[in-house]
Amino acid sequence: MRRLKNRWAREVTGLSSTDRVSRASEERKWAEWHLLDLPMTTYTEIEILPTTVGRSILGHALKQVRGDLVTVRIGLAISTVASVWSIWI
C-alpha cells in the first residue's frame, strides 16, 4: 500500500508540474485510459479494484460477442422448434 501511495503521489506531482514532457506523458496515459473505457478508482477504493476491472473486462467481452450470441439464440430457437415439430410428425 505504501508503494501504491508513493506512486500515486508521484503521478499527482507529475500532473501538477510545469514540465511539459512529464505533463504530456501523463495526459497521454490518461487519454489511453479513457479511450479504453477503463474504470476510474481512487486510492480509497483500491480494495474493490479487482472486482471493478473484472466487470469492465466482462463488459468489453460481451460487446465483442454480442452478434455471435444472437446467432446462437436463433439457432437454438430453430432447433427447438424443429425438435418439437418432429414429435408431432
Image: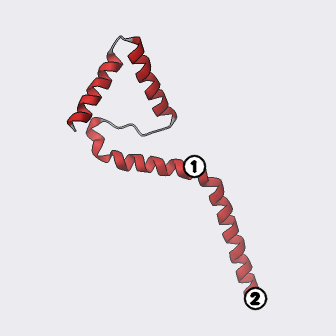
Instruction: Give the Cα distance between marks 1 and 2.
Output: 39 Å
Determine which residue is flagged by label 1: 63
Q: Is residue 32 above or below residue 46?
A: above
Q: Earlier in the sequence, mark 1 or mark 2?
A: 1
As shown in the figure, which amino acid type bears the numbered disc 1?
Lys
Where in the figure is residue 79, as x and y percent of width and height? 70, 74
Q: Residue at x 59, y 49 (%)?
A: 64
Secondary structure at numbered mark 2: helix
As shown in the figure, which amino acid type bears the numbered disc 2?
Trp
Where in the figure is residue 47, as x and y percent of width and height? 28, 46
Q: Residue at x 71, y 82 (%)?
A: 84
Report the mark closest to the observer, 1 or 2.
Answer: 1
Where in the figure is residue 42, as x and y percent of width and height? 31, 35
Where in the figure is residue 35, as x and y percent of width and height? 51, 33
Rendering quarter of residue 88? bottom right
Determine which residue is flagged by label 2: 88
